[in-house]
Amino acid sequence: MNTPGFSFRITARRARARAGVLATPHGDILTPAFMPVGTQGTVKAMTTGELEAPPLDARIILGNTYHLYLRPGLEVIAAHGGLHRFAGWSRAILTDSGGYQVFSLATLNKIDRDGVTFRSHIDGSEHRLTPERSMEIQGVLGSDIAMAFDQCPPGECGPGDHEEAMERTTRWAERCLAARRPAGQALFGIVQGGPDAARRRAHMAEIVGLGDFDGYALGGFSVGEPLTVMYELLDEIASELPEERPRYLMGVGTPADLIHAARAGIDLFDCVMPTRHARNGQLFTSQGTVVISHARHRSDTSPLDPECPCETCRTVSRAYLRHLFTAREILYSRLATLHNLTFYARTMAGLRAELNGIEARP
Amino acid sequence: MNTPGFSFRITARRARARAGVLATPHGDILTPAFMPVGTQGTVKAMTTGELEAPPLDARIILGNTYHLYLRPGLEVIAAHGGLHRFAGWSRAILTDSGGYQVFSLATLNKIDRDGVTFRSHIDGSEHRLTPERSMEIQGVLGSDIAMAFDQCPPGECGPGDHEEAMERTTRWAERCLAARRPAGQALFGIVQGGPDAARRRAHMAEIVGLGDFDGYALGGFSVGEPLTVMYELLDEIASELPEERPRYLMGVGTPADLIHAARAGIDLFDCVMPTRHARNGQLFTSQGTVVISHARHRSDTSPLDPECPCETCRTVSRAYLRHLFTAREILYSRLATLHNLTFYARTMAGLRAELNGIEARP
């Protein structure tokens, strides 16, 4: 990696999969790693202390540029010297570029060569994002890893739309590289191209050809394509991303998706699934997904997952969780989120142990 | 106190105020003490671990018989062997009798000599509570301290209504005393009588005359009467409750109310105010009440209360709390509730230290 304060060391390989250590100014991240999503400056329902405590032990969380730019606004975060101090989080942060939310959440007014004009989903106010402005905002947020400003086209669009988004994303990536960044902030490039392997390879060549990114992300996955399409495409292209740089699959997915993608060579993941599913009553366990509202859990005194060491599974029953969910108690969201994030963390820890263990054998 | 496993020892007195230790089968409670309210089997937004951790260090919480009886229902809690294990709480629990909620939340169908028929506020189903049924339910909940089933008349009612409620409450108190209780469950009687001191004294004589309660509560305060009326009445009658038994002022109030009542001789308190106010954006601090939504806190990087040792005040700023409140994030309710309950706990710890003649810890 080019940026001072960062390094990526691969500690073990198995076929296309690898385990490694991504060093940042805010600590080491053991990869493959899952990054909990802290949309509005908080991983929903969780304190920073809980995120840091083993067995969850999150080493990096994600912050959303679009959300934080609109609310609380940059001057508030600047007054705190950045997102780390604002949110009370002393480990690493990755910020997205704002592009994804502009294209999915906001009302778009205009996309042009230079950038995007949009209206806030909160109050309808008009704003403009360009590659330079996105980098400036991410600079104020002070994340450890910034993402290049890209265009992520919707899943159902045609080849022409993909070509246009690829071309624009390349041009914008170049401008992000040229923009000023604070010391100690790495920059990752994003590969688009939709579900076609040839188009993905073409765009990968363009983005990698720009030459100076600290890591590479695959965008535009899990946007409605069949699971087999995603898996086959990842099997083909993930391992073709530069070997010596961290590889990040954006916005994916289920625990099974993460395992498949890590075996294809991916190092970093983020997704709202563990936190959102938790709040909606879907809990990941070693015995499969539990829908906590189900009547069968009504008087069940057993823990949610007997194999899980999280506080939820150590202290309360399925019946209690179901009661809290039914009564719409805040404590439900807390206990459920803690468990689901712990399940994801343990899934990644299991992958790392498997990769490092096999490599360590004589 | 009569019930095996319980004792109340007064360790210090100052005028009518006293400090003491109320021993229960689930640990000692240092008095004066505030009991956080765990309406539906959870102190809203809090884990049991947080409630137990210093400086909050709650020794006893309150459970609501009416709510828990309706949801999750007794068979669910019975399957766990009681409310302690259901909620994962190993310290003491006091349950109310269900009377207050029946008269305030439910749709009343009939009050008669024997009990109350009402409709659930959740699904409209019809239920009946009598003194014997309330004791039976509290027995299944397995609280350390049960409350006698009483009638709490509304604040604006006339002398006749008070007389009727007093008479009924006395008759019901006698039946609660005669009802079976599990081993290790104490029973407190409740004094009604409205805002008139003579009527309060008359009812106190009746309830105390029944002879066998482990403690005594004052009900029907903070139901709309002026603050001066409440304060003067407490000054007159609180210290006339039996000296050697714990005295509990039900459902009151602000930190100033608690200090006034403790000086009048009260030992135990409960109120939804710290938890409810927290969620509504009103935070108690050493500098007065903070309305966190106020624009003046927008970029304020200082802690909510520089004198408070709680996790909220140690880790985040007023601006961050305001942001979470504005964005309706769950973490807001957590951090705010933790702080307000800590403020109440520190208020009580300060009172105890003052009475016991030792320096209060920060």
Image (spheres, coloured by chain):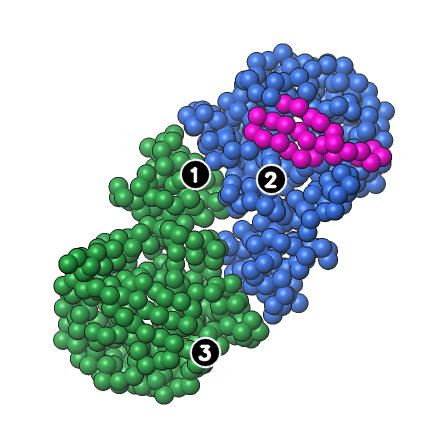
Chain colours: A green, B blue
Between A267 and B274, the one nearer to me in the picture: A267
Between A346 and A110, the one nearer to me in the picture: A346
What is the spatial separation of the Cα atoms under label 1 and label 2, in whole angstroms?
18 Å
| Left or right position of B258 against A243 | right
What is the spatial separation of the Cα atoms under label 2 and label 3, in whole angstroms?
43 Å
Residue B334, percent from left and from top: 54, 51
Magenta stretch: residue B14 in it? yes
Instruction: Check residue B58 in the rendering and tell me which mark sits there, or answer none.
Output: 2
Q: Quadrant of residue A35?
A: bottom left
Please give the name of the residue rendered at 42% of the width and 85% of the height, measured from the top-left corner: A180
Residue count near mark 3 (Cα–Cα under 10 Å), binned few <14, some 14–19, many ≥20: many
Q: Quadrant of residue A287?
A: top left
Q: Which residue is mark 3?
A: A139
Q: Secondary structure at mark 2?
A: loop
Quadrant for the C terminus of chain A, please: bottom left
| Badge 2 amino acid | Ala
The reply to whether residue B199 is visible in this rendering is no
Residue A245, percent from left and from top: 26, 74
Please give the name of the residue rendered at 60% of the width and 53% of the height, measured from the top-left corner: B310
As drawn, the residue found furthest toward the top would be B178
Q: Which residue is mark 1?
A: A315
Residue count near mark 2 (Cα–Cα under 10 Å), binned few <14, some 14–19, many ≥20: many
Between circles 1 and 3, the one closer to the viewer is 1
Check if mark 2's residue and mark 3's residue have beta carbons within 8 Å.
no
The reply to whether residue B212 is visible in this rendering is yes
Instruction: Tell me whether marks 2 and 3 sit on the same chain.
Output: no
Subunit ID for the residue under disc 3: A
Overall secondary structure of the magenta stretch? strand
Q: Secondary structure at mark 3?
A: helix
Residue B76, percent from left and from top: 43, 28
Q: Is residue B103 above or below residue A288?
A: above
Which segment is the magenta one?
B6-31
